[in-house]
Amino acid sequence: MSRSVSRRSALGLAGGAIAVAAAATAGVAVPSHAAARTRQGPGAGPRVESLVGRLTLDEKISLLHGATDPEALGQAGYVPGVPRLGIPPLRLADGPAGVRVAARATALPAPVMLAAAFDPALARRYGQVIGREGRALKQDVLLSPMVNLIRTPYAGRNFETFGEDPLLAADMVSAEIKGIQGEGLIATVKHFALNNQEKDRMSIDVRVDERTMHETELRGFEAAVAAGTGAVMGAYNKVNGTFACENRTLLSDILRERWGFEGWVMTDWTAQHSTAAALAAGLDMEMPEGVYFGAALKKAVRNGTVPEPHVDRSVRRVLGVMERFGLLDKSAPPRPARDPKAGAAVALDVAKAGATLLRNAHGTLPLKGRAARDIAVIGPTGRHPFVSGGGSAHVVPDRADSPLDAIRARAGRGADVTYALGEDLYGKAIPRRELSPGLDAEGQRVAAGKEWTYDGTLTPAESDEWTLVIHYSGERPKVELDGVELYPKQPGVGEFFSGGLVSSAPDGLNVRRATLPLTSAGHRLRIRAEGGDRGQTFRLRRITGATRAADVAAAVRAARGAHSVVLFAYEDATEGQDRTTVALPGHQEDLIRAVTAANPRTTVVLNTSSATSMPWLERTAAVLQMYYPGQEGAAATAAVLFGDCDPGGRLTQSFPMDDDHHPMAGNPLRYPGAGGVEEYSEGVLVGYRWYDAEGVRPLFPFGHGLSYTTFDYRDLSVRRVGRGLDVTFTVRNTGRRDGVTVAQVYVGPSPDLAMEQAERVLGGFERVALRAGQRRRVTVHVDRRTLSAWDTERHGWVLGTGRRAIQVGVSAGESVLSAHTVVKGAGS
């Protein structure tokens, strides 16, 4: 597994931020040259049938599992193809926030930031950049987008997906897939299904009822199928006792029979557990190798355990998608060149559109006058750009500006912009007097092919808690302190998925940390380092209580000496592990308290993956949520801080007050599971629906976000249109600045459905940009699906008829207009 995982996720990829923005495409989510074939099933084409008939059993099986790429480009997976029949290979790349290969690629903002814009048209542009660049980088299949709902605030991949609401997720994933595939790159929606956490993700058994599954998690996947996604990736976890990658209910009954999916289903990497059962259930491809669909599959066919027509069925699905995208008859257009300037422009638009202003006391933002010219910037991500999260979503750009530099440039000549670190991520040099001779702790070089050892002592000047930070360029050195190894190999993917910020130093060296109490009595320090093929350099640094206090003191001095403060705080999430708290990591809360006490005109900029608790909120002047903003994050942050654009984002997830007040709190069976089982006992009350039902007040509700101007909503009308409702109202910008509001329509429960229902569900939304004084009549359509519920007796959707409340709001917690309408059944 380690060889495959490291190919997929090693963080030292030579990377960059060259992007390609694509022209808008219309219609179905396939390249234009294939449009005529979009309604044919994978086995409908005579070319596919001819190929299946001519393929040998070995050749068929070779199309159903991954292999080693002889010309690897650093991508996640490879399927070799069959040269003698003109079937080309497939290269599969990760790409939630940009194409992840060993080459330059656009580092787009995290998908959660894209979703915060509440703008499907922007999602389509986002997909177009990835789609065209993926083809430019010689890829054929994108392992994205991810549409699993944000169910728990702790999930390590919350930044890779869209939010907690099924409708929002469905609208965004549909648009992004159309953008990706319109450029000729095959999209893969993932992880099917109910992969809503990283903790025990390889084995957890998710127990969920039929109604909950269809009304929450599955809606986004169904929308992806309707948008024409070429592939689906099965999840690691079990669903109701059966692994997702051999779950007939998911892969055949729902995906193919109910939704009509005609593409192929692949496993997540090493997520397969059987041969015959998986193939019969509807799985088509094992990645990244062929443990079950290689020699084991051939043996099963030969001995009659697996009928060869089952193999043929999967081969048809793979070849059918390849034909649809012009890969079999070479009708696919030539691979385009990259356009870094256009790609960067889209990355900037997304980061500005998703920037979410959570608090703005006394009009602190935008910065103007003296506040815009006398600024202290504080925090590590103020100097070191936080581009993306860790794991398979991590994209390394070839350039990403520092927010500090962007703020200085925007403040202009003559402005006084100072900087203080505040919270140390990478450590400071260990004083030479505290180490015995023989170690150059600030740059020990190990020659290629050599082994270097050190056996000495570390004698701190005083007893303190130390965090020993190692920076290394090759294989991680083995470091023992008093006989205890400080940086052991992590189990599973933990060795490779370790964050997008804290695991790599600004100069590119890999970083690991170990925290422990040390005394002034002295400690035996032993190090063994390998030079490897190219040699390596490593550093050993430290963070102590004393250095931490000095950093905070310097930050306080900077804050006192400036008119305004912009303090950057971070939380570094990654695939492979969940967060353990919604609080900021490290000692950042103490830093914020100290700085806001010194200067109450402090804006906190959050580079975090998901919901964050803020016990320090009332001390701040403003809070700006910037997530992981991609390569143009610095420019976008400066643009919002100085008011060059309105903060256009709104929360796609509820922010809880703390770790004790959210849907998973106090219920280990609900999360993270107990005895290998996890129950989705919240049912359909996901996210804001749970807060409504339980009467729990979140820190910030779903949909929340502030503007630099004000808006007036009025003149609400509701009318039945076709199979849904049109909700129409007038929005006017009543302020003096141009700005953005996101109108959100919520629908109340049906009195005619004898089942538990949410107090309100999102029925539709519209991002509205208005000039100062401008007004617009806005219509939001609420479709029949949103007005319906899943009936477990009929195993289908039933319309929620009767008198239903309609609310227009600016968040799930703030309604500005309301009405009632009667929903009637068919023929009424």
Image (cartoon, grey):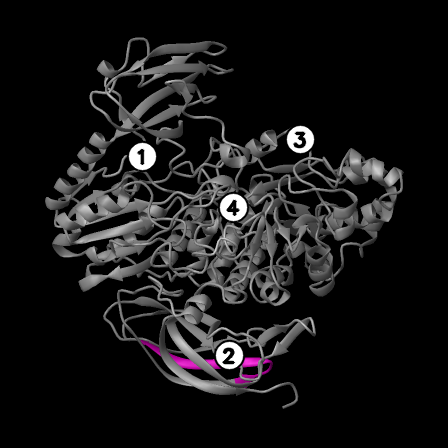
Q: Give the range drawn in magenta.
A: 720-732
Q: Where is residue 95 in the image (x, y as percent from the top left)?
A: 53, 45
* Residue placed under numbered mark 2 in the picture: 749
Indicate which label's residue lies in the foreground, 4 or 1.
4
Q: Earlier in the sequence, mark 2 or mark 3?
A: 3
Please state if 649 lies on the left or on the right of 291 as rendered: left
Q: Which mark is residue 68?
A: 3
Residue at the location (20% across, 48% down)?
Answer: 593
Task: Name the quadrant containing residue 535.
Answer: top left
Indicate which label's residue lies in the foreground, 2 or 1.
2
Q: Are marks 2 and 4 in contact (CB under 8 Å)?
A: no
Q: Which of marks 2 and 4 is nearer the N terminus?
A: 4
Q: Is residue 723 magenta?
A: yes
* Residue placed under numbered mark 4 in the picture: 198
Indicate which label's residue lies in the foreground, 2 or 3.
2
- Within 10 Å of disc 1 (Cα), the crowding (few <14, some 14-19, many 20+) is many
Secondary structure of the residue carrying tag 3 is loop
